[in-house]
Image (cartoon, rainbow, N blue to C red):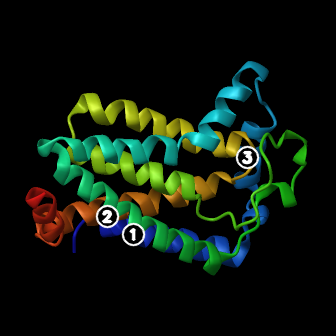
Amino acid sequence: MKKYWVLLILFIALTLYVKVVGEQNIPLNVEVFKLINYHQISFLNPIMVLLSKYGREYVWIPVIAILLIFKKTRKIAITLAASFILAIILGEGSKYLVAQLRPFYYVFPDYLLVSEPHDFSYPSGHALIVGDGAIVLAFTAPRWVWVPLLIEALLVSYSRVYVGVHWPLDVLGGWLLGGWIALFTIDMEKRGVLRPFERALKAE
């Protein structure tokens, strides 16, 4: 078995734990949320809101577009896009399977910096996508590309707890699932599964 399957096993184990216990009933999860969300720093708030709102689609879709422009990086772009599609499908399915409500339903909501999302909380879709993207690039792109985007991914993930819309375990779950999807997609690309898409782009 490929080593990256451990990430999926850990994600499933965490998901079952969250489903059975409920994130609001996990003391460490609640305390870490309060530690981050209840101790906001006023001058950082606009930055965290910006990261939380725009750090996913407004960064990672342009990244794919830029990588598609150059022949040397098109394979990376295709791998990234394929991993995102899989992440969206599995992430949304997991949300409705677990049906975990967001933190502001359970804890003091005065530190909510953005409008209330109406979907479920676990796993964090933002953490899932940016974590997936950062890990794909870490294994396929030069350091000068993936290091800044890894930092961006970590900041976006942190911001989701900071602004009050996700539990810490939502973020952890997103990174575990995103990590598995990233490495699985890279493996599929090496096996030639994505080759028809690469050929189609070369034909253009």
Which element carries disc 1, helix, strand or loop?
helix
Which element carries disc 3, helix, strand or loop?
helix
* Amino acid type at mark 1: Leu
Please name which of the two marks, 1 or 3, marks the residue nearer to the observer: 1
Judge whether 8 appears above or below 102 on screen: below
Q: Quadrant of residue 150?
A: top left
Q: Quadrant of residue 43?
A: top right
The percent position of residue 163, horizontal first and vertical second, equals 73, 41
Q: Residue at x 80, y 54 (%)?
A: 116
Q: Quadrant of residue 60?
A: top left
Q: Residue at x 58, y 63 (%)?
A: 123
Q: Residue at x 25, y 43 (%)?
A: 67
The dot on residue 33 is: 3
Question: Residue beneath label 2, please?
Answer: 82
* Amino acid type at mark 2: Ala
- Decide: marks 1, 2 in contact (CB < 8 A)? yes
Instruction: Report the Cα–Cα distance between label 2 and label 3.
Output: 32 Å
Q: Nearer the viewer, residue 30 or 94?
A: 94
The dot on residue 86 is: 1
Judge whether 162 appears above or below 4 on screen: above
The percent position of residue 170, horizontal first and vertical second, equals 61, 58
Count residues near mark 1 (Cα–Cα under 10 Å), then give few for <14, some for 14-19, many for 20+: some
The percent position of residue 78, horizontal first and vertical second, equals 24, 57
Count residues near mark 2 (Cα–Cα under 10 Å), then give few for <14, some for 14-19, many for 20+: some
Q: Earlier in the sequence, mark 1 or mark 3?
A: 3
- How many labels, in total? 3
Q: Residue at x 73, y 28 (%)?
A: 45
Which element carries disc 2, helix, strand or loop?
helix
Q: Earlier in the sequence, mark 2 or mark 3?
A: 3
Judge whether 132 appears above or below 143 on screen: below
Please name which of the two marks, 2 or 3, marks the residue nearer to the observer: 2
Instruction: Report the Cα–Cα distance between label 1 and label 3.
Output: 28 Å
